[in-house]
Amino acid sequence: MMIRPEPVQGPTATEVRNQVREQIRDAVHSAQQTAREVKSETQSNVTRIETKNGVMTITKSPALPRVPGTPSVPGIMVQGGDPDFDPNIIASRVETISIAFFIMLGCMVVLTPLARAFGRVIERRGQVSAPAPQLVEQLQRIEQAVDTMSVEIERISESQRFLTKLQSGSVDRLGAPAQRG
C-alpha cells in the first residue's frame, strides 16, 4: 500500500487578490499617516520673525533617520548675518558695473581712433620728409648761379687791384714831383 500524500492546496486566485489588496491598502494608509505626521512636525518647526527688511523664516530640519553607530545630529539650522544687510545691494552693484562697462566700451570706440591719429602726428614730427625733386633742381641751379657770381666778383676785384697798382705805379714813373715837406 502506497500512501499518497494529499496535494497541498494553495490559496486560490481570489484569496491572493484579496491579500494583495489588503497589503496595498495598509501601505497607502501607513504612507498617508506618515505624511500627516511629517506635515504637522514641519509646521510646528517653522518660526517666522519679522525684521525691518522683511520676513525671516527659521526652520528646524526634520530629524534624519538614525543609522546605528552614528551620533545624533541637532535638528536646527540657523543662518545669521548682518542686520543692516540689504538683499538688493547685489543688484545695484551689478547695475553699476554694467553701466561702467558700457561707458568704457563707448570711450574705447571713440578714443582709439583719436589716439592712433595723435600717435601718427607725433611719429611724423621726428621724420624729415624728402624734398620734392623740383625743389632739389631749383636749389642746384641757385647754387650754380651763386658759384658763378662769386667767380665773377673775384675776377672784378682782381682787376680793380691790378688797375689800382698800375695807376699808382704809372704816377711814379711819369716823374711827378714828390711832395716836399
Image (spheres, rainbow, N blue to C red):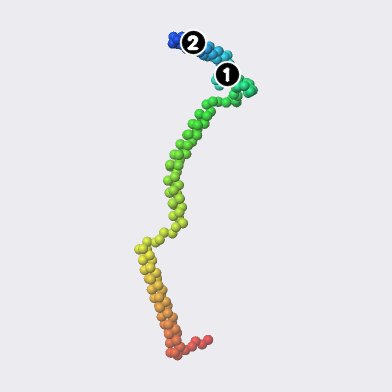
Position of 180 relative to 40 (above/below):
below
Position of 68 relative to 171 (above/below):
above
Say few, some or many: other residues with alpha carbon within 10 Å of mark 2 (under 14 / 14 to 19 / 20 or more): few
- Marks 2 and 1 sit apart, C-alpha to C-alpha, by 69 Å
Where, by quadrant of the figure, is residue 71 drawn? top right
Q: Is residue 170 left or right of residue 90?
A: left
Which residue position is annotated with label 1? 62
Q: Position of residue 40 (x, y in %)?
A: 55, 13
Q: Position of residue 25 (x, y in %)?
A: 48, 11
Of residues 160 and 8, which is closer to you in this image?
A: 8
User: Is residue 157 in sight in this rendering?
Assistant: yes
Q: Amino acid at mark 1?
A: Pro
Q: Nearer the viewer, mark 2 or mark 1?
A: 2
Residue at 63% in and 23% down = 70
Q: Position of residue 12 (x, y in %)?
A: 45, 10
Which residue position is annotated with label 2? 1
SS class, disc 2: loop
Q: Which mark is residue 120?
A: none
Of residues 135 and 91, which is closer to you in this image?
A: 91
Q: Earlier in the sequence, mark 2 or mark 1?
A: 2
SS class, disc 1: loop
Say few, some or many: other residues with alpha carbon within 10 Å of mark 1 (under 14 / 14 to 19 / 20 or more): few
Q: Position of residue 83 (x, y in %)?
A: 60, 24
Q: Amino acid at mark 2?
A: Met
Residue at 40% in and 61% down = 130
Residue at 56% in and 20% down = 56
User: Is residue 76 in sight in this rendering?
Assistant: no
Residue at 49% in and 31% down = 95
Where, by quadrant of the figure, is residue 52 drawn? top right
Q: Is residue 7 left or right of residue 63?
A: left
